[in-house]
Amino acid sequence: MIRRFGHPFVLALLAIALVVVPATVSIAGTSAANYHWARTQSRFRLEVGDNVSGNWDRLLRRTLADWNKNDTVTLNKVSGRTDPKKCRPVTGRVEVCNGNYGTGTGWLGLTRLYLDRGHIEAATVQMNDSYLNARRNKYNTKDARRHTLCHELGHTIGLDHVDTRSCMDNSEDAIFNNLKPIHRDFRELKRIYEHRDDETSVSSASVTSEGFPASTSLPAESIGPDATETVTVQTLDDGREVITFITWAKD
């Protein structure tokens, strides 16, 4: 069953009965909190695979430097291990990709978190050059690219949407003006990771994409004039979950 909810409060409920497994819940402008990387220390390092090209290379380095001003997680850029066209997950790390994923998709950026019992096992980020590097497109600006990359990377470390001057603000205005994280984001990271886990899901020695789904279903379009981002939660047959954050292009 697929359910969609309006933004910012529940405005309508549309249920469509589908005989499919796994189930996907689509929630526009809503929190999908209570997830984080498992680790045995409060401060940790997380590998970020570089599968980007063109103007994204320098921007990735700059954005990682912006996030690394926090005192909780250090994002360490390493060589990518996936095909940018497919951007498959790799256990224990984040893979960042760019490509011409098409304007028919309707999205600027897309982040997927692969979870087991609330712990992130892997994450992927995709930047859609069909908007962000296309001629005569309003999103083809350095600021829009910087915001979108910063925003999606924030999701990979457990941050949700905010209504501040942070890049984690998901409004249309923020895409062109909120270009980096702020101290409030860093305080939230400290809160999320102040405890210690008994296990770790970071930088697993068994680096593989085996066992992860090849793809997940996505809603066809955004919901409502203010729904710049949609969150979907897909439950797999084995009980694991895939959370997908979709940042939409607005006409």
Image: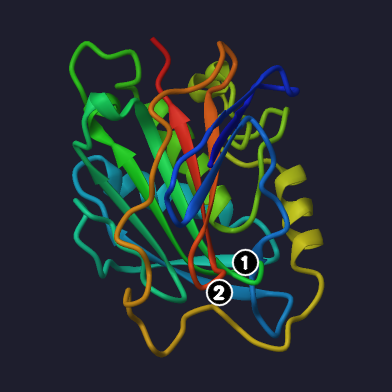
Task: Give whichever of 175, 130 is nearer the camera.
Answer: 130
Residue at disc 1, secondary structure:
strand
Above or below — where is 26 with respect to 49?
Answer: above
**Residue 17 in view in this figure:** yes
Residue 45: which numbered mark, if any? 2
Q: Position of residue 72 (x, y in %)?
A: 69, 66
Query: In the image, is 86 to the left or to the right of 204?
Result: left
Q: Kindly check if marks 2 and 1 are in contact, taking CB atoms under 8 A apart as contact.
A: yes
Q: Position of residue 247 (x, y in %)?
A: 46, 32
Work out how far the residue at label 2 is from the one at label 1, CA to CA, in angstroms. 6 Å
**Residue 179 in view in this figure:** no
Amino acid carrying mark 2 in the image = Arg
Q: Decide: few, some or many residues near mark 2? Use Cα within 10 Å; few <14, some 14-19, many ≥20.
A: some
Q: Decide: few, some or many residues near mark 1? Use Cα within 10 Å; few <14, some 14-19, many ≥20.
A: some
Amino acid carrying mark 1 in the image = Val
Residue 190: which numbered mark, if any? none
Task: Give whichever of 218, 230 is nearer the camera.
Answer: 218
Q: Residue at x 74, y 76 (%)?
A: 42
- Sequence-wise, the earlier of marks 2 and 1 is 2
Above or below — where is 157 with respect to 240?
Answer: above
Q: Position of residue 197 (x, y in %)?
A: 73, 82
Residue at disc 2, secondary structure:
strand
Above or below — where is 159 with respect to 178?
Answer: below
Query: In the image, is 68 to the left or to the right of 185?
Result: left
Residue under pointer 1: 73
Q: Residue at x 43, y 41 (%)?
A: 149
Q: Position of residue 35 (x, y in %)?
A: 67, 61
Q: How has the structure been colored for display?
A: rainbow
- Examine the image and state in which quarter residue 249 appears: top left
